[in-house]
Amino acid sequence: EVQLLESGGGLVQPGGSLRLSCASSGFTFSNYAMTWVRQAPGKGLEWVSGISTGAIATYHAEPVKGRFTISRDNSKNTLYLQMNSLRAEDTAVYYCARWRHGNYFDYWGQGTLVTVSS
Amino acid sequence: QTVVTQEPSFSVSPGGTVTLTCGLSSGSVSSSYYPSWYQQTPGQAPRTLIYNTNTRSSGVPDRFSGSILGNKAALTITGAQADDECDYYCVLYMDSGIYVFGTGTKVTVL
């Protein structure tokens, strides 16, 4: 059974940093691209970042470009999102998802809440 | 900035049919945008319904179908059931590894 489990969320002050993790199981992690999607409270889904299987290619949405970095450790079956210079508008539940060839996301974690507030 | 538009809300009767659409603020949606559709109940993670315009994800009932209608992607629910009442999001692939989610549609079954 495919499982994705996010962790690392919490309360952080504006301008601060946080690193999210997404631990995977039930599939060969190194064979799949992965992505992060977020959802602000009461708002819609927003694609954040994506990474290829071998981490050769990474992609970020404009609102987070230059502040967020997606990475992965295939030896640990884990996906990461390093978030720097956090702003109030980054407050959201962050989901990791498996990114399939064919341009869609097939399995999702349950999410971790990031709150940026003083 | 690209905006992917969806109807804010739709109401459908039990057993009825509803078609949600997914459009671009400028331009037409085609299969080359690889439209996919996701269902989300409040407080829960999204669930994948449709990908590559019209392919149902594993375990998704055949009352859900995807298509291109005119210049938009579309998700049709045929024979709506009470547990279809939730939020629906489309996603379009914009090239160069970038994706944009639609604004979402809240479906009410009553």
Image: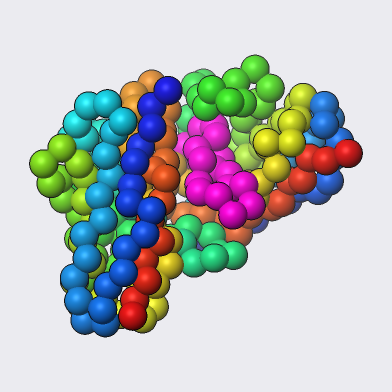
Q: Position of residue B54 (x, y in %)?
A: 19, 52
Residue beneath the point at 62% across and 30% down: A70
Q: Residue at x 34, y 27 (%)?
A: B94
Q: Is residue A79 left or right of residue A26?
A: right
Q: Is residue B39 visible?
A: no
The answer to whether B61 appears left or right of A88 in the picture is left
Q: Main secondary structure of the magenta part?
A: strand
Query: In the rendered view, would you say A1 is above or below B54?
Result: below
Residue B105 percent location from the top left of the image: 38, 56
Looking at the picture, the colour scheme in use is: rainbow
Disc tally is 0
Residue B34, relative to residue A23: is it above or below? above
Answer with the quarter of the image where residue B65 lies: bottom left
Using the rendered view, name the quadrant where residue B3 is placed. Answer: top left
- Name the residue at 76% across, 26% down: A84
- Relative image position of residue B97 (x, y in whole percent): 41, 26
Q: Which residues are magenta?
A: A31-50
Residue A43 at least partly seen: yes
